Image (cartoon, rainbow, N blue to C red):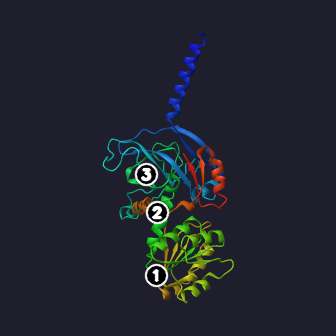
C-alpha cells in the first residue's frame, strides 16, 4: 500500500508515453551514401482538401536503391519511397465523401507532377516539365517522395482504390502503371512479335502485358532462371545473348521480318544500341529504362529513314495508367505474386536495403 502512489504514477507515465508515441509517425531518411535512419515526426494534421493515409507497405524501387548506393545523387536528408499503399484513416472536411471513406485501401499515385504546366494540362503529367523528386511534401520533416513514411497527407487526386490483393502485392501498382504506359506507347497489335530485353521485374511485366495484347513475346536475358520464369509466364521464346546472337535468333523466329516492337528495359546504352538490330521495318523500339551512365548511342539515320521505324522513350505514368493498373490487379487480370521477393518489417530496414541492392531480387517490400 505504501507503494501505491508510485505504482499509480508509473501507470500514468506509461499511459502518457503511449499517448505521445501514438501521436508520432516514423519515416526512413537517407542521410548519406549507404546511410539511412529511422526517424520520428508528428503525425500530420489533416488539411481541408487532403486525407491522411496510414502506409501499410512500400517497395524499394531501383530508384531508391540507386539513391542508397550513391549512384543517383540527391540532397540529403531525403525521404524516398514512391511504391506505397495504405488505408485512409482521416479525411479533411472538403474531401468528397461520395468517393472516399475512412478505411479505404488505396494505392498512392505519384505526387511529383506540378499539375500546371503544358504537359500536365495536356494529359501527359508523366512528362511534367517540373517533375521534382525533391519536393517538400506537406506534413513530412524532410523533402523527397515520402513513401517510406508511416503517415502521409495525400490529395484525393493521387489516390486509387484497390482490392483483392495483399498490401505487399499492391505495392507493384506503380511499376505496373509505368509498364502499362510503355506498352500502350508501343501500340502493340494482335499477332505482333515483341522482343523484351531484360527479365527483371519491369521486363517481366512488359512480357505479361504484351501477351495480353495478343503478341508473341521473345525475351532476352543472360540470367536463365529469369528467362525460365518468363516462359512460365507465357513468353514464347527465350534467348541468352551471351550464347546466341539476338538479331539472328529474332530473324529466324520471324522468317526474316524481325520484331514489330522491341522493349529495352536495361540501363545499359550498349544494349540499346544493339536492340535496334532486331526492329522490323515500321517497327518500334521503346527505351524504357533510365540509363546509368548516360552514354550516347550511335544509330544510322539512313536506316531510320528507310525502315520508317520509330524510336520511342517512355518514363513514369499518369492517373489514367494508375487507374488501369489498380483495375488489372483488383480484378486478378495480372498476378504479381512472383515479383514480391522479400518482405521486411520496418525495423529491419537496413537488411531490406542491403538485400535489395544485391540485384538478385524483383521487389523487396518494407511493411509499416
Q: Residues within 10 Å of mark 3 (few under 14, many from 20)?
A: many
Work out whether residue 16 can be spotted: yes
**84 and 165: which is toward the camera:** 165
User: Mark 1 sits on what residue?
Assistant: 191
> Residue under circle 3?
106
Cα–Cα gap, marks 3 and 1: 36 Å
Mark 2, Cα crowd under 10 Å, few <14 / some 14-19 / many 20+, is many
- Is 281 or 97 nearer to us in this picture? 97
Q: Mark 3: which secondary structure?
A: strand
From this viewpoint, is residue 316 visible?
A: no
Mark 1 neighbour density, 10 Å: few (under 14) some (14–19) many (20 or more)? few
Q: Nearer the viewer, residue 196 or 3?
A: 3
**Residue 85, x across and y down, in percent:** 48, 51
Check if mark 1's residue and mark 2's residue have beta carbons within 8 Å. Answer: no
Say which residue label 2 marks.
Answer: 177
Q: Quick one: label 3 or label 2, which is nearer the N terminus?
A: 3
Q: CA distance from mark 3 to mark 2?
A: 14 Å
Amino acid at each position: 500500500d505504501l507503494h501505491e502512489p508510485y505504482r499509480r504514477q508509473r501507470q500514468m507515465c506509461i499511459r502518457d508515453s503511449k499517448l505521445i508515441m501514438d501521436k508520432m509517425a516514423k519515416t526512413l531518411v537517407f542521410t548519406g551514401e549507404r546511410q539511412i535512419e529511422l526517424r520520428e515526426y508528428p503525425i500530420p494534421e489533416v488539411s481541408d482538401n487532403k486525407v491522411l493515409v496510414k502506409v501499410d507497405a512500400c517497395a524499394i524501387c531501383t530508384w531508391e536503391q540507386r539513391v542508397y548506393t550513391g549512384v543517383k545523387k540527391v540532397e540529403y536528408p531525403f525521404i524516398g519511397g514512391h511504391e506505397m499503399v495504405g488505408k485512409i484513416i482521416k479525411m479533411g472536411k472538403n474531401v468528397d465523401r461520395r468517393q472516399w471513406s475512412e478505411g479505404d485501401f488505396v494505392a498512392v499515385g505519384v505526387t511529383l507532377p506540378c499539375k500546371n504546366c503544358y504537359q500536365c494540362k495536356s494529359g501527359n503529367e508523366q512528362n511534367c516539365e517540373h517533375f521534382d523528386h525533391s519536393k517538400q511534401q506537406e506534413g513530412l520533416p524532410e523533402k523527397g517522395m515520402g513513401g517510406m513514411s508511416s503517415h502521409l497527407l495525400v490529395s484525393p487526386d493521387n489516390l486509387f482504390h484497390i482490392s483483392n490483393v495483399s498490401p505487399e502485392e499492391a505495392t507493384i501498382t506503380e511499376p505496373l502503371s509505368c509498364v502499362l504506359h510503355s506498352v500502350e506507347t508501343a501500340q502493340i497489335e494482335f499477332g505482333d512479335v515483341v522482343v523484351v530485353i531484360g527479365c527483371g521485374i519491369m521486363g517481366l511485366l512488359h512480357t505479361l502485358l504484351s501477351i495480353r495484347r495478343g503478341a508473341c513475346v521473345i525475351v532476352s536475358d543472360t540470367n536463365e532462371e529469369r528467362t525460365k520464369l518468363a516462359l512460365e509466364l507465357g513468353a514464347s521464346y527465350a534467348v541468352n545473348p551471351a550464347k546466341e546472337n539476338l538479331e539472328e535468333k529474332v530473324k529466324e523466329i520471324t522468317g526474316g521480318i524481325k520484331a514489330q516492337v522491341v522493349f529495352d528495359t536495361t540501363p545499359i546504352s550498349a544494349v540499346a544500341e544493339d536492340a535496334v538490330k532486331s526492329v522490323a521495318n515500321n517497327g518500334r523500339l521503346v527505351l524504357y529504362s533510365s540509363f546509368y551512365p548516360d552514354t550516347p548511342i550511335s544509330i544510322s539515320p539512313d536506316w531510320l529513314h528507310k525502315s520508317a521505324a520509330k524510336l520511342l522513350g517512355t518514363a513514369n505514368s499518369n492517373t489514367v495508367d494508375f487507374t488501369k493498373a489498380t483495375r488489372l490487379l483488383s480484378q486478378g487480370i495480372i498476378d504479381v505474386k512472383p515479383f514480391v521477393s522479400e518482405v521486411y518489417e520496418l525495423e529491419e530496414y537496413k537488411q531490406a536495403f542491403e538485400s535489395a541492392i544485391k540485384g538478385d531480387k524483383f521487389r523487396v517490400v518494407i511493411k509499416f
